[in-house]
Amino acid sequence: MSSFWLNVLIIVHVLVALAIIGLVLLQHGKGADMGSGFGGGASGSLFGATGSANFLSRTTAILATVFFVTSVALTYLGSQHGVPQGVMDKSVTDKGVMERVVPAKPSDVPQPAPATAPAAPAPGGAAPADVPK
């Protein structure tokens, strides 16, 4: 599968996830229908008294199925990319992550700075300014 179709699948997956989030936020809770029985005005809506709940829940179920299918497809495609692109040496891919680490040469490791000797007293017997009296 080409990289183009993989990117298309990822974009569809993200858009479906955002649509599910939006639809779940639009749905009413179970206690919200009690107000419509006392003249809440839900019967005059676009889908009728229960039409919106059925439409939103069915659409959410369809999108959840699409989300599940794209998740499985992305997982399968991700498992098929075992060898990194550009690596042709089979011995490199058989090693673990820590086995691929190349040890540094001693010249590459920074050495600590040598310790400096304490400052000598100034000539004439004057004590340095940072020495307590």
Image (cartoon, rainbow, N blue to C red):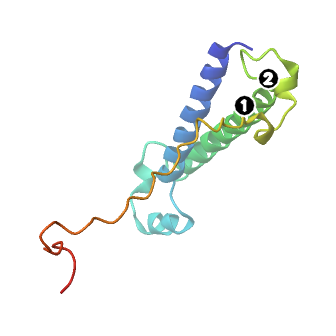
Q: Between label 2 and label 1, give the one nearer the viewer.
A: 2
The answer to which image quadrant residue 118 occupies is bottom left
- Say if 95 sits above or below 30 in the image: above
**Label 1, residues with CA under 10 Å away: few <14, some 14-19, many ≥20:** some
Side (left or right) of 32 relative to 54: left
Which element carries disc 2, helix, strand or loop?
Answer: loop
Q: CA distance from mark 2 to mark 1?
A: 17 Å
Q: Position of residue 48 (x, y in %)?
A: 49, 47
Nearer-the-camera pick, 63 or 75 = 75
Nearer-the-camera pick, 62 or 105 = 105
Side (left or right) of 70 relative to 31: right
- Badge number at residue 98: none
- Badge number at residue 74: 1
User: Which part of the image, by quadrant, shows the C terminus?
Assistant: bottom left
- Which residue is drawn at the image coordinates 83% and 27% (left, top)? 93
Most extreme residue toward the front is: 124
Nearer-the-camera pick, 88 or 22 = 88
Q: Position of residue 86 (x, y in %)?
A: 72, 14
Most extreme residue toward the bottom is: 133
**Which residue type does callout 2 highlight?**
Val
- Say if 55 sits above or below 8 in the image: below
- Which residue is drawn at the image coordinates 15% and 66% (left, top)? 123
Side (left or right) of 13 relative to 43: right
Sequence-wise, the earlier of marks 2 and 1 is: 1
The answer to which image quadrant residue 12 occupies is top right
**Which residue type does callout 1 highlight?**
Leu
User: Which part of the image, by quadrant, shows the N terminus?
Assistant: top right
Which residue is label 2 attached to? 83
